[in-house]
Image (spheres, helix red, strand yellow):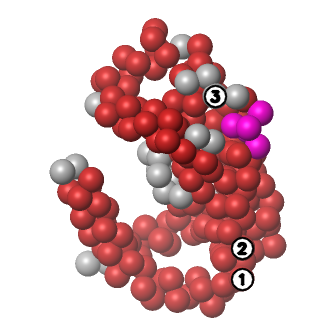
Amino acid sequence: MKLFSRLYIMVMVWARHRHAPFYLSGTAFIESIFWPIPVDVMLAPMALAKPQKAWHYAGLATLFSVLGALFGYALGYALWEPVVQPMVAAVGYQDKIVLAEQWFEHWGIWVIFIASFTPIPYKVFTVTAGLLHMALLPFIVTSLIGRGMRFFLVAGLMRWGGEKMERKLMHYVDVLGWLCIALAVAAYFWFSK
């Protein structure tokens, strides 16, 4: 089934849209607070569609992601009980917050770097950092480094790959899409044990 190739074509059209940088910035901001879709989903096709602007897009994604992280931190710091805790309970994320607290206790500031660079849900750690009253300056610096490394790596790979990578992706996008879904389902069952 060619579901992902149609989606890929649509995403590449959106990535070339004149308002795409605004959408990227907004997505990066809200992804650090609550949005479940990673910024890379928008950043990669934008960097691929306009490789000459890849570094600019990575910079926007980094800046707005860290600004969103600061907002998430503020929510955890000042509005945990009246606002955040009921929302966390409503979506069933209490166990994720408890796990994040344990990770902070065990790894300290490194957990922010790990969450900002890897696919681990960064939003859980931004809010938890505020809840735990983590020192703000190390939080900001670590977030900038982790997010910057991640987004500049993605943009760099897309810039390096260019049109040749775009053609290859188009050829394999359906296989890769179904593989990602299979891995996500397997990860869900593995971690929900």
**Amino acid residing under circle 2:** Gly
SS type, badge 3: loop
Mark 3 or 1, which is nearer the eye? 3
**Residue nearest the observer in this picture, 122 or 58:** 122
**Label 2 crowding class (10 Å Cα cut-off): few <14, some 14-19, many 20+?**
some
| Residue 139 lies within the magenta run | yes
- Work out whether mark 3 precedes mark 1 in sequence or the reverse, and give the earlier one: 3
Q: Are marks 1 and 2 in contact (CB under 8 Å)?
A: yes
Residue at (37%, 17%) from the top-left corner?
86
Asked whether residue 18 is in view, the answer is no
Q: What is the span of residues highlighted in magenta in the rendered image?
A: 137-141
- Which quarter of the picture shows residue 176? bottom left
What residue would you read off at disc 3?
134
Left or right, 134 with reference to 90: right
**Amino acid residing under circle 1:** Trp
What residue would you read off at disc 1?
160
